[in-house]
Amino acid sequence: MASTKLRDGLRDVAVGLLTPFDEAGRIDHEKLAANAEALSSEGLGTFLACANISEYHSLTHQERIDITETSVKALSDDDCVLAGVGGSTKTAQDLVSTYDRLGVDAMMIMPPDHTYLHERGLLEYYEALAETAESAIVPYVRGFEPSVEFLADLTRIDNVAGIKYAIPDEVKLGQAIAAGDDDVIWVDGMAEPYALSFWSQGAEGFTAGVTNFEPRLGTALLTALREENWERARELQNAAVPYQQFRTRTGEDNSLADAISVPAVKYGLELAGYNGGDVREPIVPLTESEKTDAEELYERLQSDLDRIL
């Protein structure tokens, strides 16, 4: 059964800890720890270590362990830490066992990276990881179109404490919540622009978009949702949209959507006085033109928040 700390953490706004690389591609652990400490001091309490936005798939197995260890040590015992887990069953089980020893509060199971998937086989994968974990697991559902039956069955796996739902389909979310186990906490994995609509369907927390570098937004939005202040929630949600839409751009010389998502957040961290750092391939840095756009959108975000708050 999930701990009270984890359940409260899943109902909070969860911030991703991005990985600061230097120009040679090395991880700057001091800057990673500084970001974690600073964001925690701003009142945020739930953190995603070694997550998708942390460039999980560009990290080695040992780097994932090292990043998670740095994150756990930098944060207080009161903070809730979910650590990213993925890959083959054996690789993922090794990470789960190591993360448990490091003291994380839960394992966030990364979206499957297989070309071919079977819902029953994917459930078996989650079951194997849930059986390995001393702490709970939180599957991250993204990148495929699961059935409502699959989502409901996922909630019935022992040791699944929550589900990070990152599919832009509110109707399916509502159907899955109605069909699934009531003990599982559903989390909006589409960030602030979906917080209000997903909340109305039964999601109880959300993951950060611009809150990764602007804590005021996420904490105020969560308060508005809890207080059922829908007008204020819409204002805050809409304040996040322009920068979030910027993240969906293809970037230059590219036709793939969302290509600048990670460097856009890293630059937001820099603009806010945190540590962004470089990126690793297959991600590329922002161009100078994109940085100019980010700066204008960041200033717009600050102006909107100053007005709203």
Image: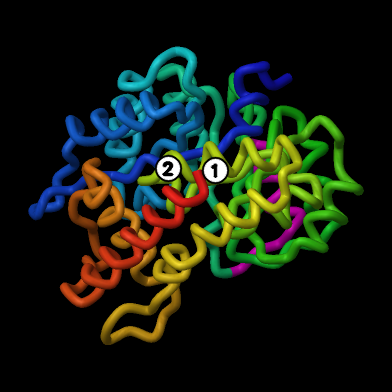
Q: Which residue is mark 1?
A: 89
- Looking at marks 2 and 1 on the same chain, the residue that comes earlier in the sequence is marked by 2
Residue 191: give x, y in percent of width and height.
55, 53
Taking 159 as reference, is 207 above or below it? below
Per the image, label 2 sits on a secondary structure element best described as strand
Measuring 30% from the left and 29% from the top, which residue is drawn there? Answer: 38
Location of the N terminus by quadrant is: top right
Pick whichever, 168 or 216, lies toward us.
Answer: 216
Measuring 86% from the left and 37% from the top, which residue is drawn there? Answer: 181
Residue 156: give x, y in percent of width and height.
82, 37
Specify the quadrant of the image occupied by residue 112.
bottom right
Which residues make up the magenta segment?
A: 116-128
Taking 224 as reference, is 81 above or below it? above
Measuring 26% from the left and 29% from the top, which residue is drawn there? Answer: 33
Q: Is residue 39 magenta?
A: no
Measuring 63% from the left and 44% from the top, which residue is drawn there? Answer: 139
Amino acid on which the number 1 mark rests in the picture:
Thr
Regarding residue 255, the answer to whether it shows in the image is yes
Q: CA distance from mark 2 to mark 1?
A: 24 Å
Q: Left or right: 223 with respect to 34? A: right
Q: What predominant SS class does the magenta segment belong to? A: helix
Numbered label attached to residue 16? 2
- Most extreme residue toward the top is 77
- Most extreme residue toward the left is 24
Pick whichever, 261 or 227, lies toward us.
Answer: 227
Residue 30: give x, y in percent of width and height.
17, 30
Residue 70: give x, y in percent of width and height.
29, 26
Counting labels gives: 2
Amino acid on which the number 2 mark rests in the picture:
Gly
Q: Is residue 122 magenta?
A: yes
